Image: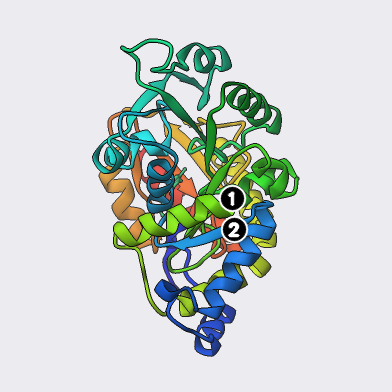
Amino acid sequence: MEFIDLRSDTVSHMTDNMKQAMLNAKVGDNVYNDDPTTIELENIAAEMTGKEAALYVPTGTFGNEASIIAHCNRGDEILVGDVSHIVAYETGGPAFLGGVLTKTLKTTNGLMDINDIKSSIRFSSDDIHFPTTKLICLENALVNGEAVPIQYMKDVWNLAKEKGLSVHLDGARLFNAATALNCDPKEITQYCDSVTFCLSKGLCCAMGSIVCGTAQFIKKLRLYRKMLGGGMRQTGYMAATGIVALKELVPELKNDHAMARLLASELSKIPNVVILNPKGNINLVFFQIKDEKLDCDSLVKFLLDQKIKISIKSKEDKIIRFVTHYWIREKEVEHIVSSFKKFLEKMN
Ligand SMILES: *Cc1c(COP(=O)(O)O)cnc(C)c1O
C-alpha cells in the first residue's frame, strides 16, 4: 500500500494521462516564446479566467510576487489581509524584490473589512508624507479552507476601480473556489486585474502555476519572470501535464471536497475532536484534539506506521490540518478514520 498523504494537496502526484502527455509533448524554447504546448496551456488558462493573456511560472509564490512588482513602483503600497499567503508565507518578497510596502489589514474569517480598505487608501499626490496605494491583494479560496463569496470580490473591485487601484487575486486554489461556489471561474476572476493559480496543488501537476491578466500586464510579467530566473526552456513537457489538469482534474475537485466533508463528519464523531472550520467548503479540514494526554509526536509516528502522513499545525494547541486530493477517496478516508480511532483508544 502506498502512503496516504494528508499534509497538503501539493503532494498529489501526476495521473497516468499526465505522464503520457509529457512523453508526447511538442516542445520549443519558452524563453523565445515558441514552445507550442506552453502557448496552448497559456491560451486555455486565459480563456478559462476570461483574461487576454497568461504566463506559465514556476510556482504560485513566483506568480504572486512577480505580479506585485509588475503592478507597483518602488515605494508604492499594497493592501493585503494579515493572514494571507502573501504576508504570512512569501518571505517578505514584496519588500525585498520590489521595494513595495505591505499594509496588512486585520481580517475576520480571512477577509479584510471593506471600510478598513477604504480608509487605508492614500496617495502621495494628496499629501507629500504618504506612499501611494496601488494594489489590493485578495485570496480565493482562503487558506482557512473557505471560498470567498463573489459579492465580496465585487465590492472590493468596485472600490478599487473607483479609486483607480488594481486588484490581484491569489487564486492558488481558484478552481477549488469555483467548484465550492458552483460557478464558472470567470465569475470570480471578472473582479480582478490579475490572477495566479497553481497547477501543483489539487490539480496533480509536479510543478507550475499560471498568471492571467491583460496582454500588456503579461508582457511586463514576462520581463520580470526572466529577471527573477524563471525563464525556463522546454516547459512544454510540464505544460502538457497542465493541459490535462485543466481538462480532466478540475472536474474532479468536487470529489476532493466531498472527501474533506466526509473526513470532517467522521472525525467530529470522535470524542474530544472539534472541527475548527465547520464552514470549510474546499479540501481543507482543520481540527483540534481537546485531550491533555495527547502527544502529537506519538500520533504522527503511529499514523506513519499505518502508512498515513500528517503534519501538525500547532503541537501546543493540538491543531491538525488534513488536506484531501485526487489520491484520497472513500477507501483511504476509511483507513484514516479507523487508524485515528485506534490511536485514541490505545491512548486512553
Ligand atoms: C500554496 C499557495 C501559494 C503558493 O504556491 P507555491 O506554488 O507553493 O509557491 C500561494 N497562495 C496560496 C493561498 C496558497 O495556498
Q: CA distance from mark 1 to mark 2?
A: 6 Å
Q: Quadrant of the C terminus?
A: top left
Give the x, y percent position of residue 336: 49, 54
Asked whether, in this view, residue 196 is left or right of residue 44, the answer is left
Q: Nearer the viewer, residue 156 or 148?
A: 156
Q: Is mark 1 within 8 Å of ligand 1?
A: no
Q: Can see residue 6?
A: no
Q: Residue at x 67, y 68 (%)?
A: 247
Q: Can see residue 71?
A: yes
What amino acid is at disc 2?
Ala
Q: Nearer the viewer, residue 137 or 201?
A: 137
Give the x, y percent position of residue 124: 38, 17
**CB atoms of marks 1 and 2 within 8 Å:** yes
Residue of label 2: 53
Q: Secondary structure at mark 1?
A: loop
Q: Residue at x 64, y 31 (%)?
A: 153
Q: Residues within 10 Å of mark 1 (few under 14, many from 20)?
A: some
What amino acid is at disc 1?
Thr
| Label 1 vs 2, first from the N-terminus | 2
Give the x, y percent position of residue 342: 44, 50
Q: Establish if 130 lies above or below 160.
A: above
Identity of the residue furthest to the bottom in this view: 24
Residue 200 marker? none
Residue 255, located in which quarter of the rendered image? bottom right
Q: Residue at x 56, y 12 (%)?
A: 115
Q: Residue at x 27, y 43 (%)?
A: 97
Residue 248, located in which quarter of the rendered image? bottom right
Q: Is mark 2 within 8 Å of ligand 1?
A: no
Asked whether, in this view, residue 264 is left or right of residue 3, the answer is right
Q: Nearer the viewer, residue 174 or 95?
A: 95
Residue 214 marker? 1
